[in-house]
Image: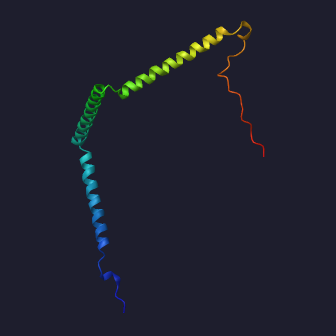
Amino acid sequence: MAEPASSVPDPFAMWRDWVSQSERQWNTFLNEAMASPQYGQSLGRFMELSLAMQKTMAEAMGRYLGALNMPTRTDVMALGERLATIEERLIGIELRLDQLSRPASDEAAPLETVPRPPRTKRPVEP
């Protein structure tokens, strides 16, 4: 009648077992390797090298952009900070001028914020 299915070997089951065993072996080996002080030292050296390369590339890019007469990221950020400072000072000057231009009777009244534009759009009625 019907033959039992267990007589035919399952190639996928053998492959899954091999992958599981390989994974366990690699996991054991790499955990032992990462626990060693040499691994930490080599990783530290790699990070130092990576940071040195980043610094060198940033300096080279800055020189390159300078030769092309283009601003670097640092230049743009510094310009943004200066602009923000100028805007803050301008707001302070405007507030002081507004206080000085008011009559003495209005000094007790609180300072108004920026005047709102007139509302010209009316809601639609259903």
Please identify the quarter of the rendering in which residue 109 is found.
Answer: top right
Q: Residue at x 26, y 29 (%)?
A: 60
Please identify the quarter of the rendering in which residue 70 is found.
Answer: top left
Q: Position of residue 62 (x, y in %)?
A: 30, 27
Q: Is residue 61 above or below residue 39?
A: above
Q: Nearer the viewer, residue 39 or 49?
A: 49
Relative to 3, is 46 on the left or the right? left
Q: Residue at x 33, y 81 (%)?
A: 6
Question: Furthest residue to the bottom?
Answer: 1
Please identify the quarter of the rendering in which residue 58 is found.
Answer: top left
- Which color scheme did the rendering employ for the protein? rainbow
Q: Where the N terminus falls, by quadrant?
A: bottom left
Q: Is residue 89 above or below residue 41?
A: above
Q: Is residue 54 above or below residue 102?
A: below
Question: Furthest residue to the front?
Answer: 120
Question: Furthest residue to the top?
Answer: 104
Relative to 7, is 103 on the left or the right? right
Q: Position of residue 31 (x, y in %)?
A: 28, 50
Q: Position of residue 51 (x, y in %)?
A: 28, 33
Q: Nearer the viewer, residue 13 or 31?
A: 13
User: How many tags in the picture?
Assistant: 0
Relative to 30, is 97 on the left or the right? right
Q: Nearer the viewer, residue 70 or 47?
A: 70
Q: Position of residue 40 (x, y in %)?
A: 25, 40
Q: Residue at x 61, y 11 (%)?
A: 96
